[in-house]
């Protein structure tokens, strides 16, 4: 171990420190080195986001463990173990090409068809289209539940994260569909009591507990569901769709204010304005924008 430490210190002094000193004395090479590092880190992060939650990610974690074991066996001079692991890794590189042939082909096809723009998140228009599709699905579900007088509470997460609210419910992480939303709020089912949180165009969780508003100006006829909608919209920038169980009327809560009895087309317009149009305008005019309280 002492020999290893001495060798490592010499390597650091001669190679790393010397290389850094050389970069500092040559500004252009230093700039290119920083650019090189940024590009590599960026590519690694993008690849990690693409393979996360796939079988590729699980295998990569296994490879990392084997690499660590290989390094440790070399440090401890476990010759036989190190030899076996080294040989295994050498052959495994070729096996990866066979194992991940479908994934490699898919990536190359995407590059060939111009889908590389997705890797760099140049798909803002596609995201707007998807968000509008999800809004229409929620509107369909809200109208259906309004017709059957099924109480519902649907929260759209915006810039302020609602992880603490999501953690109070049951994680779902499912694609939005009118059928699923209607099924969640069916009376006497396990998930109907509470709110559904929509985050990143997905149903993140159901049966979530929301903070109730204690504003005395709220009409007495409004029940717990509406008070919860007003409460979360006051404490965050979320947009909340409420369906009354008593009357079947649809309402929207925003900035602590309740817009009552909205019709189908009005519901869609309000959601599109707040979830698509306003966020885009805020990004374009962020520096010129007045404080939210002043605007309201």
Image (cartoon, helix red, strand yellow):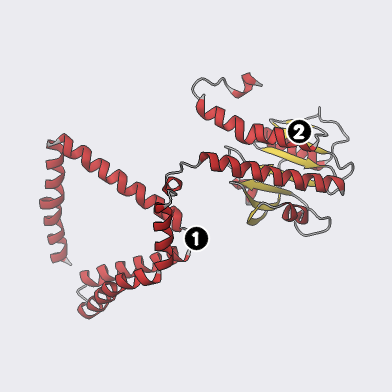
Which element type, helix, strand or loop, lies under badge 2?
A: helix
Query: Mark 2 — residue?
Result: 266
Q: Which of the marked residues, 2 or 1, is nearer the chain's N terminus?
A: 1
Which quarter of the image is occupied by the N terminus? bottom left
**Image height check: is 291 above or below 270?**
above
Report whether residue 279 is seen.
Answer: yes
Residue 135, x across and y down, in percent: 68, 42
**Image height check: is 83 above or below 60?**
below
Question: Could you say which disc has been placed on residue 53 in the image?
Answer: 1
Residue occupying the far bottom of the picture: 80
**Image height check: is 194 above or below 5?**
above
**In the figure, residue 82 lies in which quadrant?**
bottom left
Q: CA distance from mark 2 to mark 1?
A: 38 Å
Which residue appears at 29% of the width and 76% of the height? 88
Q: Relative to residue 221, is residue 163 drawn left or right?
A: left
Which residue appears at 16% of the width and 34% of the height? 27
Which element type, helix, strand or loop, lies under badge 1?
A: loop
**In the figure, residue 23 lies in which quadrant?**
top left
User: How packed is label 1: few (under 14 Cα within 10 Å), some, or many (20 or more)?
Assistant: few
For discs 2 and 1, the disc positioned in front in the rendered view: 2
């Amino acid at each position: 171990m002492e020999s290893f430490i001495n060798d490592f210190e010499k390597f650091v002094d001669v190679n790393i420190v010397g290389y850094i000193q050389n970069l500092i004395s040559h500004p252009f090479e230093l700039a290119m080195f920083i650019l090189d590092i940024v590009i590599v880190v960026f590519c690694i992060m993008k690849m990690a986001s693409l393979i996360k939650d796939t079988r590729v990610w699980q295998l990569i974690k296994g490879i990392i463990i084997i690499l660590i074991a290989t390094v440790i066996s070399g440090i401890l001079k476990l010759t036989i173990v190190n030899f076996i692991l080294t040989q295994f890794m050498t052959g495994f590189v070729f096996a990866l090409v066979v194992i991940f042939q479908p994934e490699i082909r898919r990536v190359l096809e995407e590059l060939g068809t111009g889908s590389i723009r997705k890797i760099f998140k140049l798909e803002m228009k596609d995201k707007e289209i998807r968000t509008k599709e999800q809004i229409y699905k929620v509107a369909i579900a809200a109208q259906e539940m309004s017709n059957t007088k099924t109480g519902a509470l649907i929260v759209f997460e915006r810039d302020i994260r609602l992880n603490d609210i999501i953690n109070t419910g049951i994680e779902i992480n499912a694609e939005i569909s009118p059928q699923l939303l209607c099924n969640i709020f069916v009376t006497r089912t396990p998930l109907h009591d509470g709110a559904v949180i929509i985050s990143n165009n997905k149903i993140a969780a159901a049966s979530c507990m929301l903070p109730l508003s204690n504003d005395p100006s709220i009409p007495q006829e409004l029940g717990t569901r509406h008070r919860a909608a007003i409460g979360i919209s006051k404490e965050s920038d979320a947009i909340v769709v409420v369906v009354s169980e008593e009357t079947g009327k649809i309402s929207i809560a925003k900035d602590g204010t309740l817009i009552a009895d909205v019709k189908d087309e009005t519901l869609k317009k309000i959601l599109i304005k707040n979830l698509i149009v306003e966020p885009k305008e805020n990004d374009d005019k962020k520096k010129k924008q007045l404080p939210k309280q002043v605007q309201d």
